Image (cartoon, rainbow, N blue to C red):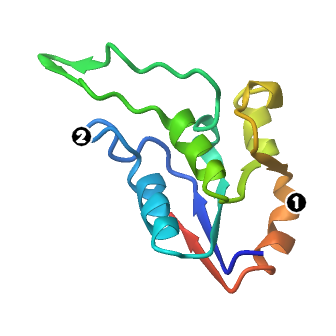
């Protein structure tokens, strides 16, 4: 088990200004530097591993986002790096997202199972 659980609950943080979610990017960087961590996606962030997202064409007035986020790819890359990515199944259901819509490699955890999950980590970071 990893020593840090990185909980991401706020979705699409910084994706207008940048092409990445700040915390997903930070998780990639920390893992690349040797950190031992896992991720729990909850709240609106459960949208991140939905397969096939397409934010191209996003614009605000005259400002077009020319590097749209590809959060499903970013999460898949975390899984590929050996990061355990968990998704709160209750939050998925509340948003009408079926587990079959998610990328491969993510794990579901019920909201009722999160307290026990927290106890298995030395540190919990909640974003």
Element under disc 2: loop
* Above or below 93: residue 54: above
Q: Which mark is residue 17?
A: 2
User: Residue at 54% of width from left, 35% of height from top?
Assistant: 73
Residue 5 at x, y percent in the picture: 65, 71
Q: Which mark is residue 56?
A: none
Apparent side of residue 46 relative to residue 96 in the rendered image (left or right): left
Can you tell which quarter of the image residue 125 is in? bottom right
- For the residue pair 77 and 22, the one nearer the viewer reads as 77
Residue denoted by label 1: 112
Answer few, some or many: residues within 10 Å of disc 2's Cα (few below 14, many 20 plus, some between 14 and 19): few
- For the residue pair 108 and 89, the one nearer the viewer reads as 108
* Above or below 81: residue 52: above
Residue 28 at x, y percent in the picture: 48, 58
Residue 121 at x, y percent in the picture: 73, 80
Apparent side of residue 110 relative to residue 26 in the rendered image (left or right): right
* Above or below 80: residue 103: above
Closest to the camera, between mark 1 and mark 2, is 2
Residue 83 at x, y percent in the picture: 65, 60
């Amino acid at each position: 088990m990893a020593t840090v659980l990185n909980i991401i609950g706020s979705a699409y943080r910084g994706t207008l200004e940048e092409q990445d979610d700040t915390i997903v990017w930070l998780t990639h960087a920390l893992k690349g530097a040797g950190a031992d961590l896992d991720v729990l996606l909850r709240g609106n962030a459960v949208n991140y591993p939905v397969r096939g997202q397409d934010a191209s064409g996003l614009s605000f007035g005259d400002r077009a986002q020319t590097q749209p986020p590809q959060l499903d790819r970013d999460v898949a890359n975390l899984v590929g790096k050996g990061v355990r990515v968990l998704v709160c199944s209750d939050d998925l259901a509340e948003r009408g997202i079926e587990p079959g819509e998610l990328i491969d490699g993510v794990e579901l955890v019920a909201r009722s199972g999160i307290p026990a999950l927290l106890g298995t980590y030395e540190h919990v970071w909640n974003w």
